């Protein structure tokens, strides 16, 4: 017999679960019943937020700092002692195939003067010597046909707005009129890029979604509702993000990332609710009740899944780099709106269409494929033969007799689950081998910063990059600025310091050239420029940076009070890379731990939560491997519009981990929710796995195809980072929906059996008391 304390704990858990489901069900029913009010509120939000964003919304730029890094400290030292040489450097590249550029000296001088007069410009360096017989500046090739004007800005040019480019164009117009080719390099070239548009990606993603929904479920209206809600959610989310961007700086890739994630989860969340709702309609429920039950069941899974994604994205702030954390915020904004839309807008639309949801169809409409298990009855049509035994269950708030049932398989997915049940170790081994093979490239991953050489040749900064490479070598596209602060060195010791540095900077491995040391105007700082023999994104450039920072410069000032720095845009990128390498393991640990706790609290199974975390880590490793093979190894890269091989952008693995881990939990939560429902009803762990697979197979497969297509469509973007994220996210969804869901999850759940839902008794009781106390006190009840 059950003891009184155990009975009390079980009663508390049941009442708490009913209270939670009841709240969501009342919300769904209210939205379905008052659909006009809900739809009007969403229309007001859509129009009002869009108007506010147009009037007060901010802009996006890649301007960010890394306080505390040696490159940032060096830039500050240089700004104090030589204000005219600091700032954000950009190049205006000149090319004349007809004659040396010295023939257009007057036009170059006019352009330099006009550039100096522009706002935000703190320095302009002409490529020509002061006099025809003067010493060369290093910015003009030996044949005189390629040169570059160096312009220093007080901030990232992209933050000035597109109109600022008109002033640059007017300044160099005399050169273009003289037949000189002019290209903008570096940060100035980024300002001159065509405005990014992801319309093609969005159209392709929507077209695939429509096709999958119509083929998978047949109903035209049911296919349109997820697309409509996802589109409205993304529009509202982007308006919210634009308003937030007015108060804080977000990266230029933020709206694209938010759109990508918002469309994917928005369609998926709506699809899961609509599928459950339509099955309820087919089973005879009225539309309002069906919508309420869908929100109470699938809606709860949506909330849990959304919270998991948001927690994973919030974990990016563990990096302590605001640039990374804000990318997570940008994606989380549209996820929050997608969750709200799923539990309010979706039931409102379902209430609006009522029983007409399957009126228009291209094939016989289907929903979940099989009705859910019910206590104390059989399926309509006698789809299963069941054996029952008496249990006590909560229905309608009253403890009453029900039945536990284990079912004989009739559906395809149920039979598949039974095959897994008979040979779980073989399926587990097959899944692990598949994931392991895909993950092999990850062991050779090289993080770095993708330079302008990977951009399309239609971009002016790519053309400028190619001209500089042709005239001065690839390293000239990302030189290092060496800064030596000798302010604490006695004047008598400074000549010896300069001599020691000169010796140390002679014949440095990996350097194509290092300019002579020059003092600033006040004599307190020495500066030099180091050019790598390789491109800024190459491993050789990273090695030269480390060599200069950790060995060459410290050796040159050894025994003195001088302080050395390696600064500049390329140095800042290398410091950023070092930060990412150091903090990526911490982010992985925090996100995995938080997701583990969420699954543990929701499903009350220690091994289930542990299994979810481990399998998702394997899925992410496999998706990393595919990204490395395509971008770093070059397998299929040209077919995706990638010029050559590139390193993996430093922050992409961090972003991918947070997003992929969160999204992988989507299908895990929806599958586990159905398995858990069946387990609570039948007490048969193996039958519960089969039932969960059978019920969710169609909807999860369709949802995965839609989400993968939405992500894959962004491979068409000109932005190499967006391509990388799009491919990585698409592959991860496919791996999760196939290898993980079809092989690993059923095999592991079968092997675990009833142990999967085990929870230490003390933790179980404490969780019961916590849930019961808080939920019932909030509702005005007393335990």
Image: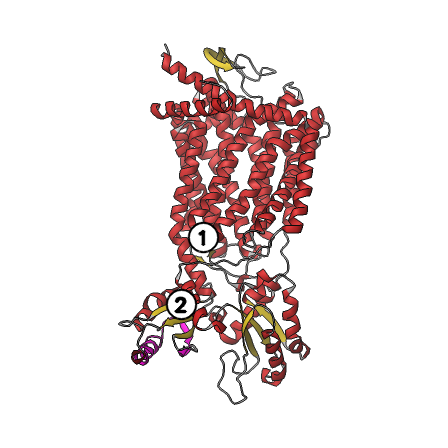
Inspect this view and state whether residue 541 appears.
yes
User: From the viewer's perspective, is residue 175 above or below residue 190?
Assistant: below
Callout 1 secondary element: loop
Residue 503 within the segment the image draws in magenta: yes
544 or 253, which lies in front?
253
Residue drawn 60% across the image and 80% down it:
108
- Tell me which segment is drawn in magenta: 494-519
Mark 2 burial class by Cα count in 10 Å: few <14, some 14-19, many 20+: many
- What residue is disc 1 on? 321
Circle count:
2
Disc on res. 566: 2
Residue drawn 45% across the image and 30% down it:
746
- In the displayed structure, does residue 387 sit left or right of residue 610? right
Residue drawn 61% across the image and 62% down it:
193
Q: Position of residue 664 (x, y in %)?
A: 49, 39
User: From the viewer's perspective, is residue 638 above or below residue 592?
Assistant: below
Inspect this view and state whether residue 707 appears.
no
Q: Position of residue 560 (x, y in %)?
A: 28, 72
Mark toward the start of the polypeptide (1 vs 2): 1
Residue 682 within the segment the image draws in magenta: no
């Amino acid at each position: 017999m059950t003891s009184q304390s155990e009975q009390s704990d079980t009663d508390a858990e049941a009442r708490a679960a009913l209270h939670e489901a009841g709240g969501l069900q009342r919300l769904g029913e209210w939205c379905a019943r008052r659909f006009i009010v809900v739809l009007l509120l969403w229309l007001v939000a859509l129009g009002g937020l869009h108007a506010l964003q147009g009037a007060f919304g901010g802009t996006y730029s890649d301007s960010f700092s890394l306080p505390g890094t040696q490159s940032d400290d060096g830039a500050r030292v240089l700004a104090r002692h030589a204000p005219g040489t600091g700032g954000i450097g950009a190049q205006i590249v000149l090319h004349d195939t007809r004659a040396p550029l010295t023939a257009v000296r007057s036009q170059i001088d006019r352009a330099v003067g006009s550039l100096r007069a522009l706002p935000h410009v703190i320095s302009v360096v002409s490529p020509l010597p002061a006099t025809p017989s003067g010493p060369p500046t290093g910015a003009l090739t030996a044949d005189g046909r390629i040169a570059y004007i160096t312009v220093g800005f007080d901030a990232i040019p992209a933050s000035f707005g597109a109109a600022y480019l008109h002033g640059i164009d007017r300044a160099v117009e005399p050169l273009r009129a003289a037949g000189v080719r002019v290209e903008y390099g570096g940060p100035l070239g980024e300002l001159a890029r065509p405005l990014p548009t992801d319309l093609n990606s969005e159209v392709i993603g929507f077209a695939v979604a429509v096709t999958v929904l119509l083929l998978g479920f047949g109903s035209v209206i049911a296919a349109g509702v997820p697309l409509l809600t996802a589109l409205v959610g993304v529009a509202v989310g982007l308006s919210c993000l634009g308003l937030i961007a007015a108060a804080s700086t977000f990266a230029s890739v933020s709206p694209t990332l938010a759109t990508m994630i918002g469309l994917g989860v928005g369609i998926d969340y709506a699809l899961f609710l609509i599928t459950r709702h339509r099955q309820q309609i087919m089973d005879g429920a009225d539309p309002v009740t069906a919508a309420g039950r869908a929100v109470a069941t699938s809606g709860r899974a949506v909330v849990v899944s959304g919270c998991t994604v948001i927690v994973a994205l919030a974990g990016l702030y563990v990096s302590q780099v605001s640039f990374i954390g804000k990318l997570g915020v940008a994606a989380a904004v549209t996820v929050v709106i997608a969750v709200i839309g799923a539990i309010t807008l979706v039931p409102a639309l379902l209430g609006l269409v009522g029983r007409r949801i399957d009126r228009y169809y291209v094939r016989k409409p289907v929903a979940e494929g099989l009705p859910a298990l019910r206590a104390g009855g059989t399926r309509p049509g006698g789809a299963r033969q069941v054996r029952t035994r008496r249990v006590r269950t909560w229905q309608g708030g009253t403890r009453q007799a029900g039945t536990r049932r284990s079912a004989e398989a009739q559906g395809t997915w149920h039979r598949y689950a039974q095959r897994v049940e008979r040979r779980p170790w073989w399926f587990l081994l097959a899944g692990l081998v598949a994931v392991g093979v895909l993950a092999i490239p990850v062991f050779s991953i090289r993080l770095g910063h993708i330079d302008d050489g990977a951009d399309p040749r239609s971009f002016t900064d790519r053309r400028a990059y190619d001209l500089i490479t042709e005239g001065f070598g690839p390293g000239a596209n990302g030189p290092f600025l060496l800064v030596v602060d000798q302010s604490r060195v006695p004047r008598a010791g400074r000549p010896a310091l300069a001599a020691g540095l000169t010796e140390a900077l002679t014949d440095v491995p990996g350097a194509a050239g290092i300019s002579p040391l020059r003092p600033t105007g006040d004599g307190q700082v020495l500066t030099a420029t180091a050019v790598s023999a390789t491109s800024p994104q190459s491993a050789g450039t990273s090695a030269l940076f480390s060599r200069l920072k950790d060995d060459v410069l410290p050796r040159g000032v050894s025994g003195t009070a001088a302080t050395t720095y390696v600064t500049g845009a390329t140095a800042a990128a290398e410091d950023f890379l070092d930060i990412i390498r150091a903090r990526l393991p911490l982010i992985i640990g925090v996100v995995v731990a938080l997701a583990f706790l969420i699954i543990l609290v929701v499903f009350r199974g220690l091994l289930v939560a542990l299994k979810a975390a481990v399998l998702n880590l394997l899925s992410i490793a496999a998706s990393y491997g595919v990204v490395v093979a395509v971008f770093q190894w070059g397998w299929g890269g040209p077919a995706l519009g990638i010029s050559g091989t590139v390193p993996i952008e430093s922050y992409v693995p961090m972003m991918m981990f947070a997003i992929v881990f969160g999204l992988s939990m989507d299908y895990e939560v929806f599958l586990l929710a159905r398995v858990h429902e069946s387990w609570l009803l039948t007490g048969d762990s193996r039958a519960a796995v089969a039932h969960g697979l059978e019920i969710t197979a169609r909807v999860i497969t369709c949802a995965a195809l839609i989400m993968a297509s939405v992500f894959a469509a962004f491979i068409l973007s000109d932005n190499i980072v967006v391509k990388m994220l799009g491919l990585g996210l698409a592959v991860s969804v496919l791996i999760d929906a196939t290898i993980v869901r079809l092989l690993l999850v059923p095999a592991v759940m079968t092997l675990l059996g009833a142990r999967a839902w085990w929870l230490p008794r003390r933790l179980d009781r404490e969780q019961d008391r916590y849930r019961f106390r808080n939920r019932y006190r909030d509702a005005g009840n007393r335990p």
